[in-house]
Image (cartoon, rainbow, N blue to C red):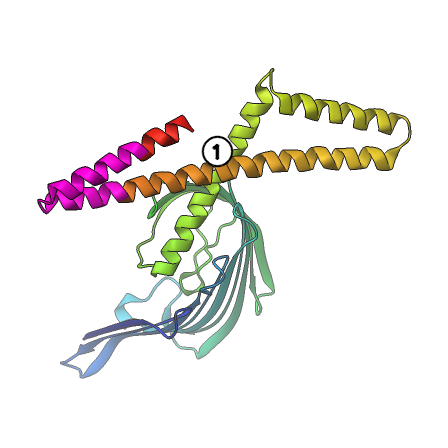
Amino acid sequence: VVVYQDIQGRATDELTLSGKFQYSQTKNRALNKVEAQYKEVMLGMAFRPVDNDRLNLFGKYTYKENQGPSGQLNVSDIEQTKMQVLSAEGAYDLTDDWQIVEKMAFRIMEEKVAGFDFATTHTWLLVNRANYRLNQDWKIGAEYRTLAVQEAKDRKSGFLLEAVHSLNDNVELGVGYNFTDFVDDLTNLGYTVAGPYVRMTGKLYDRTPEERARARQKWLDRRIEKYAWKMVNDEFTRKDSAVVLELNQMYQMAQVANDLGRYEESRQIYKDVLLATQMMFEEAANFVRKHISFEEKLYNAFQRAREYYDKGELWQAKKLWEKIVEEAERSMLQ
């Protein structure tokens, strides 16, 4: 007999709740005896603030009970186990490139060896991880793991290093090396995972219109910043740039003032040089934003013209296309 139930829903726009119940039983009808039985109950939550995309919190409680048939005992002669695991995890984006992840888990395990009563152990797991985004497609991560068993007074710790490549918005491929020999899942704790590994992670979920808008704006801001700094760097490489000539003169003035001991004056000139560079970046960013806005305007107008054309309203489509051409020519002249 097998029973499986899984449920998930949103309590609010920020809080998602989930639950799982699994039960199976194998009964010997001839002897009217339960030979094997398995129970699992899981309750989970995920908290993702709508107004703060940088923070994500997760929590989960799991209860498992497993009774194996007498003819299938493992090497330790453990015939029944009961387990409770409570875990919590938080991820916070310090910047667009740096992220920290903290995870803590606690397990109470009861094991019954054939001929003896249940023995109880308490196990703690702590994971500290930092991720750094190299570019849009690559990021690297390092984590420090600690595993401690209270009754045995035993403690294991070590590092894990990983490089992750984004194949697309929904799939990531990771390659890493685990310098420890234990996993970070107390519900399935094992000690044979040391060494290199490859993993693939998939993400498939529905985002609200607000989440999609924020994600697109963040994506757009990163590209605007990239192209704006490229325009500034291109200006600096021009030998005939009047702006660069003026900045060089200001820099030389700051050095002369510093050599003469006029440190406050030198410091102020240096600040003016940095301010002028920042102004160059802001002007370049505004230039890029202006052209992006103009291109979106033309694209939307083109889409409307196509709709007119598909409906057979050829005169409206023709007038709109003519207007698009005029706007494009005017932009080129500017």
**Secondary element at tag 1:** helix
Residue extending farthest left: 312
In the image, the segment drawn in magenta is 301-326
Residue extending farthest right: 261
Q: What's the residue at 33%, 43% (across, down)?
A: 297
Query: x and y percent of residue 33 in the render?
Result: 21, 82
Query: x and y percent of residue 291 in the render?
Result: 41, 37
Residue extending farthest bottom: 32
Secondary structure of the magenta portion, mostly? helix
Total tally of numbered discs in the picture:
1
Report the residue marked by disc 1: 227
Looking at the figure, which quarter contains the N terminus? bottom left
Q: Is residue 236 visible?
A: yes
Q: Give the camera-side residue of 84 and 321.
A: 321
Up-down relation of residue 247 to residue 56 (above or below): above
Query: x and y percent of residue 256 in the render?
Result: 84, 24
Q: Is residue 193 visible?
A: no
Q: What's the residue at 38%, 31% (across, down)?
A: 331
Q: Give the camera-side residue of 89 and 193.
A: 89
Looking at the figure, which quarter contains the C terminus? top left
Up-down relation of residue 37 to residue 283 (above or below): below
* The stretch drawn in magenta includes residue 120: no
